[in-house]
Image (tube, helix red, strand yellow):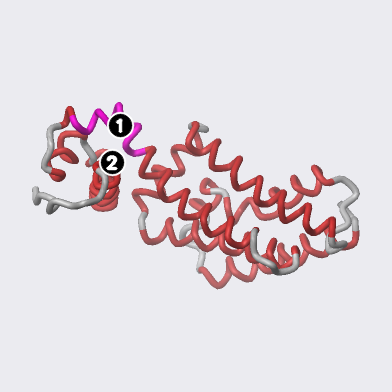
């Protein structure tokens, strides 16, 4: 196994990069604390200083991907665009990132699906942060009269239900073999329904 050249990066960052690469190449079963330690040029005891178990190490790899998605969502939520445009862009971005992960890094995607199925803490925290940004956009839309929901919480649930197929990893997994252009058309249709319902107060 090739060693990773010495780096000025913090040790935990290096370990995550190595674990992510091993996961990408070999799947979760191919990631071992000993293997990651060897590639990093350290003892496995040192790895345990940063990650108490293999499961914690893999969760951290998943969390790293989640943070990249959260950065995209937060940037959209904080943009000066009208709320309806932001909500559309936010959901499109989330759908695209999930689709890309499923097709381009299937092993990481499978771990993400498992973490979602078992409702691990790393996923629950991620969902909470995503919801906060979506609520921020919803509240902006209400304040600027772009949205006029009859009930804010029901409107939030309506959005989640309407686009579940495109942004929940379990549903994305089922659609992995569906052509991308078909999914794009279906999502575009659902977004038109969502935005119209929010604007005319039917939810």
Q: Residues within 10 Å of mark 2 (few under 14, many from 20)?
A: some
| Label 2 – label 1 distance at C-alpha | 8 Å
Q: Secondary structure at mark 2?
A: helix
Task: Decide which of 196, 70 is in the foreground and name it.
Answer: 70
Task: Tell me the mark number nearer the camera, choosing from 2 and 1.
Answer: 2
The residue where tag 2 is placed is 12
Q: Quadrant of residue 128?
A: top right
Q: Nearer the viewer, residue 19 or 202?
A: 19
Helix, strand or loop: magenta stretch: helix
> Measured along the vertical axis of the image, is residue 101 above or below residue 66?
below
Say which element carries label 1.
loop
Magenta residue span: 46-58
Q: Position of residue 86 (x, y in %)?
A: 68, 64
Residue 5 can be seen in this image: yes
Q: Position of residue 119 (x, y in %)?
A: 52, 33
Residue beneath disc 1 = 51
Position of residue 185 in the picture relative to residue 159 (left or right): left
- When asked about the image quadrant of residue 62, the answer is top left
- Disc 2 or 1, which lies upstream in sequence? 2
57 in magenta:
yes
Residue 160 included in the magenta stretch of the image = no
Pinpoint residue 134: horizontal percent, then vertical percent.
68, 51
Name the one closer to the observer, 92 or 6: 6
Q: Are marks 2 and 1 in contact (CB under 8 Å)?
A: yes
Q: Is residue 197 visible to us here?
A: no
Residue 101 horizontal side relative to residue 39, left or right: right
Q: Residue at x 58, y 42 (%)?
A: 127
**Residue under the image location 29 percent in, 41 percent down:** 28
Left or right, 179 with reference to 89: left
Residue at point 72% right, 56% down?
A: 137
> Is 79 drawn above or below residue 201 in the view shown?
below
Q: How many marks?
A: 2
């Amino acid at each position: 196994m090739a060693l990773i050249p010495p780096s000025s990066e913090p040790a935990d960052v290096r370990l995550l990069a190595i674990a992510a690469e091993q996961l990408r190449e070999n799947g979760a079963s191919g990631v071992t604390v000993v293997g990651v330690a060897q590639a990093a040029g350290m003892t496995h005891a040192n790895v345990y200083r940063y990650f108490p178990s293999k499961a914690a190490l893999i969760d951290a790899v998943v969390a790293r991907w989640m943070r990249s998605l959260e950065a995209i969502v937060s940037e959209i939520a904080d943009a000066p665009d009208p709320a309806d445009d932001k909500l559309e862009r936010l959901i499109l971005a989330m759908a695209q990132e999930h689709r890309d992960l499923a097709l381009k890094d299937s092993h990481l995607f499978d771990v993400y699906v498992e973490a979602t199925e078992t409702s691990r803490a790393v996923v629950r925290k991620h969902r909470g942060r995503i919801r906060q940004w979506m609520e921020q956009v919803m509240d902006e839309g209400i304040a600027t009269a772009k949205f006029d929901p009859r009930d804010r919480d029901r409107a939030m649930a309506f959005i989640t239900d309407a686009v579940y197929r495109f942004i929940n990893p379990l549903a994305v997994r089922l659609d992995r073999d569906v052509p991308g252009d078909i999914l794009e058309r279906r999502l575009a249709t659902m977004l038109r329904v969502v935005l119209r319902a929010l604007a005319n107060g039917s939810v």
